Image (cartoon, rainbow, N blue to C red):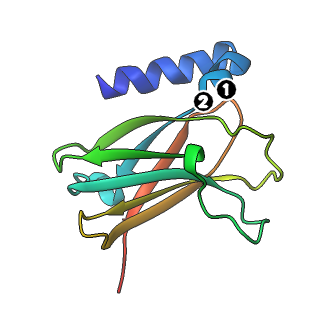
Amino acid sequence: MVLSTVGAAAFLALVNPAVAAADGIDGTVTFQGGATIPKGQIEIYLSDPAQQDNAPHGADRLMVRSNGKSTTLAFTLPSPADSPTSSALQVVARLERTDGWLLAYGSTKLRPGQPAIVMLNKALY
């Protein structure tokens, strides 16, 4: 089912990129090596490395729960209210345990009209 959702989003983006972008930014989250995504909370947001303050803002972020059994999770991130200020805009995903401990982090460059595929990598301490 996840793959069919991703396939439909990719098809929609190819056929009509303006329609795909109007509803939000579609994408998937995977874990390094194709492993199961650990149980926890995934925060997904846009980040602009060109800006000094690139922290996520309220409506610009999405929270997704991982049950620890999936290898891929689909998401639709709300489109930003204002137009992007940089061509370096990135989709960022952070996986945290319920106690707030960072388990994994990943990002990918946002490409208009294409789904964002973010691979989470284990956080090293």
* Position above or below: 44 against 48: above
* Position above or below: 100 against 72: below
Which residue is at the front of the view, 66 or 11? 66
Determine crowd level at label 2: few under 14, some 14-19, many 20+ residues with C-alpha closer than 10 A.
some
Decide if residue 117 is on the left or right side of residue 55. Answer: left
Q: Residue 18 lies in what quarter of the image?
A: top right
Residue with the mark numbered 2: 24
Q: Which amino acid does label 1 sit on?
A: Ala
Which quarter of the rendered picture does the N terminus lie within? top left
Q: Residue 76 has which mark?
A: none
How many numbered discs sit on the rendered protein? Answer: 2
Q: Residue 107's spot in the image, x, y percent? A: 54, 58
| Label 1 – label 2 distance at C-alpha | 5 Å
Residue name at image x 71 percent, y 68 percent? 53
Q: Which amino acid does label 2 sit on?
A: Gly
SS of the residue at dot 1?
helix
Q: Residue 71's spot in the image, x, y percent? A: 26, 45
Asked whether disc 1 touches disc 2, contact meaning CB atoms under 8 Å apart, the reply is yes
Q: Residue 21 has which mark?
A: 1
In the displayed image of the protein, which residue is found farthest to the front? Answer: 58
Residue name at image x 26 percent, y 53 percent? 37
Which residue is at the front of the view, 19 or 101? 101
Determine crowd level at label 1: few under 14, some 14-19, many 20+ residues with C-alpha closer than 10 A.
some
Which residue is at the front of the view, 55 or 115? 55
SS of the residue at dot 2?
loop
Q: Residue 99's spot in the image, x, y percent? A: 24, 69
Which residue is at the front of the view, 99 or 40? 99
* Position above or below: 26 against 1: below
